[in-house]
Amino acid sequence: MAEKIIAYRFDQVDQTLSQLNKEDCTIIAGGTDVMVLYKSRRGVPPKITKPIVFIDHLNELKQVYKKGKDLHIGACCTYSDLLNDPLIPTPLKNAIKTIAAPAIRNRGTLGGNICNASPAGDTLPLLYVYNAKLVLRSVSGVRIVAISDFIQGVRRVDRKSNEILAEIILPSELEEGAYAVFEKVGNRNADAIAKVGFAGYIRTNGEVIKDIRFAFGAVGPTMVRSVDIEKKLIGKTIPLAGADIAQVLSAFDKIIKPIDDQRSTARYRKTVALNLLRYFLSRKQYQHN
Amino acid sequence: MITFTLNGRKVETDAPPSARLLDVIRDEYLLIGTKEGCGEGECGACSIFVNNLLQNSCLIPIGSIEGAEIVTIEGIMESDQFKILDESYSEAGGVQCGYCIPGMVMASAALLAQNPHPSEAEIREGISGNLCRCTGYNMIVDAINLAAKKGDGLWQKK
């Protein structure tokens, strides 16, 4: 007889947090990653060694609301919840539409995509260019961290064992003159894990670039973003000069270090990543969204 | 003990909390219409409804569905909607080996309940999480199209 699997499913976030403060647990929201990670053979329950804490039923973690200039998104909102919510920005909806297929979108959560910290996490490039902040809750209170600090490596995040990711904070509306876009390259439209993901953000005043950001997914252990390279473009005018574009491409050429794996090759990934960036930078105008 | 509704009936299981809903419905309740294909959420053969939403039962730990309403392919077989789908899949030649079909029918029913008059692109999106290695999908798309027409007015009914 296998060892007994312990699981908790509390009615309140507070009870959940006190349990997490007592013991280290595996947190399951949608479970679409965890159940695959610990999969056993047919008929045998996944081997999850730590006690399980289910959180996907907690309404407190499924709220979407505006507070000042911020949009707070409950970590346990499923992708389908977000697609149906009028407050969610269109570029994020477009990114979500590229994730998996309807059945998984009815189950997988935004918080889960972040905490799973896959190098190919579909929502991550866009969350990076939005400068998303994460609200972590524990018995000791609330801690807010930038997503780029939270995600530290492949499946490695700065979550203490007594914390849960409760909310994701995005700007509620893009500033005047801002444009954001997400692109995903995969083997097929549905259920594909990205070979390359790209998110771009630009804010212009007339033709002058006021702010510009890029993030690449699936081309390194975490999302690749460089604030230093971005800064060099601020103050330039669009359309950008060929020399400026070439300079940015060559800077990213040095820091994008993809690998070969079953989904793609390093060479293909780098070529496509740089092509997506070139395409984004070569546009003559950016429609505010 | 985990309590939930399975095809309209209240049931209780003492399966371990991480057990897959797929295994529980097949092994404990002997509802074997729901199939296992990939076991990783990529093929849709195990599609069921959880609180009326299409989901992959291979990815659902039983401990998370306390109080939920689960409906499997067996649970919709008496409905008028199923009869229309059944006829349409037969007429369009949408079934060959049949292994993907319970999942495909669940996805079709979920799509039509949400969108009774889908375009071809919407049909393809609706079944995008369901793999069929026989038909090449065209006959399945035809079947869903046919079901939308034949069952006009029926789909939005609960």
Image (spheres, rainbow, N blue to C red):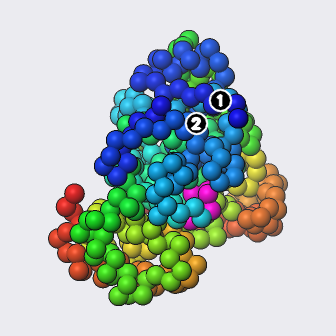
Is residue A190 shown left or right of residue A90? right
Q: Residue A77: x and y, percent?
A: 44, 41
- Look at 33% across and 66% down and name the residue there: B77
Q: Residue A157: x and y, percent?
A: 68, 33
- Look at 56% across and 28% down and name the residue there: A7
| Same-chain status of marks 1 and 2 | no
Is residue A38 shown left or right of residue B126? right
Residue A184 falls in which quadrant of the image? bottom right
Find numbered disc 2 in the image and state the secondary structure of the residue it sits on: loop
Q: Is residue A109 above or below residue B119?
A: above
- Look at 53% across and 26% down and name the residue there: A8
> Badge 2 is on which residue?
B16
Q: Is residue A160 above or below residue B132?
A: above
Which is more toward the observer, A242 or A212?
A212
Q: CA separation, marks 1 and 2?
A: 7 Å
Is residue A232 shown left or right of residue A190? right
Residue range of the region highlighted in magenta in the rendering? B38-43
Is residue B148 shown left or right of residue A27? left
Q: Amino acid at mark 1?
A: Lys
Chain that bears disc 1: A
Q: Residue A58: x and y, percent?
A: 42, 30
Identify the mark at residue A4; answer none if there is no mark: 1
